[in-house]
Amino acid sequence: MTPASPGSLTSIRTMHTLLSIRNAPKIFSALTAAYFITSLGHFSHNAEFICEYPNLPAWLTRAQVYAVWAGITSVGVVGLLLMRKKFMATGLLLMAVYAAMGFDGLGHYALAPIEFHPLVANVTILSEVVAAALLLPVVLWFLALHMLRHVRTFRKECP
C-alpha cells in the first residue's frame, strides 16, 4: 500500500487533520444546519398534515408537534451557546443528544409500516434521520478529541 492510498496511515492522518483543524467549523456548521432544516421540514409536515400520518394518537395537535420540535431544537441551541461560551464538553454533549433525537422520527414506523405513510412523510422522516446520522458521529468525534486534549493537558500538569 502506498502512503497516499486510501486506508493508509498517511491517509488516515490527513483525514484526521482535515476533520479536526481546518474544516471542523465548516463541517460542524453544515451538518448542524442540515439537521436543523430537515428536522424543521419533518416536524412542519407532521404538524400541517397530521391527519395523513397513520395511527398517531387522536389527542396529538398541530401545536403540540411544533412545541416538541421547539423543545428538541432548544437542546441544540443551548449546546451551541455553551460551545460558544467555551463550555465545549457540555455543549458537545448536548449537541450529541440533539442529534440522537433525530432518530425519534423512526417511531412513526412503529405505529405503521413505511408503505402506509405518504411519500412526502417518508422523505421528511428519512431525511431527518440521515442528517442526524451524519451529525452524530462528527459531534462524538469532536467530543472525543476535546476530551483527549483535556486528558493530555491534565497529565502534563500533574507530577
Image: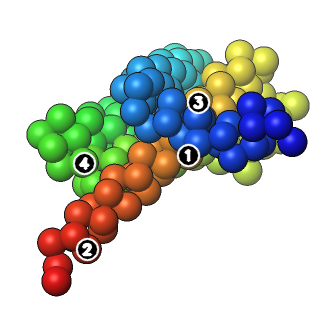
Q: Residue at x 71, y 21 (%)?
A: 123
Mark 4 or mark 1: name the one nearer the start of the chain.
Answer: 4
Q: Is residue 136 visible?
A: no
Asked whether 45 or 30 is in front, the reply is 30
Q: How dense is the environment of label 1, judged by Cα within 10 Å: few (below 14), some, or many (20 and up)?
A: some
Q: Nearer the viewer, mark 1 or mark 3?
A: 1
Asked whether 80 or 68 is in front, the reply is 80
Q: Residue at x 65, y 25 (%)?
A: 127
Looking at numbered disc 3 in the image, what kind of residue is underneath it? Ala
Mark 3 or mark 2: name the one nearer the start of the chain.
Answer: 3
Q: CA distance from mark 1 to mark 2?
A: 27 Å
Q: CA distance from mark 3 to mark 2?
A: 36 Å
* Residue 141 in the image, given as x and y percentages of width and height: 49, 48
Mark 4 or mark 3: name the one nearer the start of the chain.
Answer: 4
Residue topped by disc 1: 137
Quarter assignment of residue 150: bottom left
Mark 4 or mark 2: name the one nearer the start of the chain.
Answer: 4
Q: Quadrant of the N terminus?
A: top right
Mark 1 or mark 2: name the one nearer the start of the chain.
Answer: 1
Residue topped by disc 4: 88
Looking at numbered disc 1 in the image, what kind of residue is underneath it? Pro
SS at mark 1?
helix
Residue topped by disc 3: 131
SS at mark 2?
helix
Residue topped by disc 2: 155
Tell me if label 4 and label 3 are in contact, CB under 8 Å: no
Answer left or right for 115 relative to 62: right
Mark 1 or mark 3: name the one nearer the start of the chain.
Answer: 3
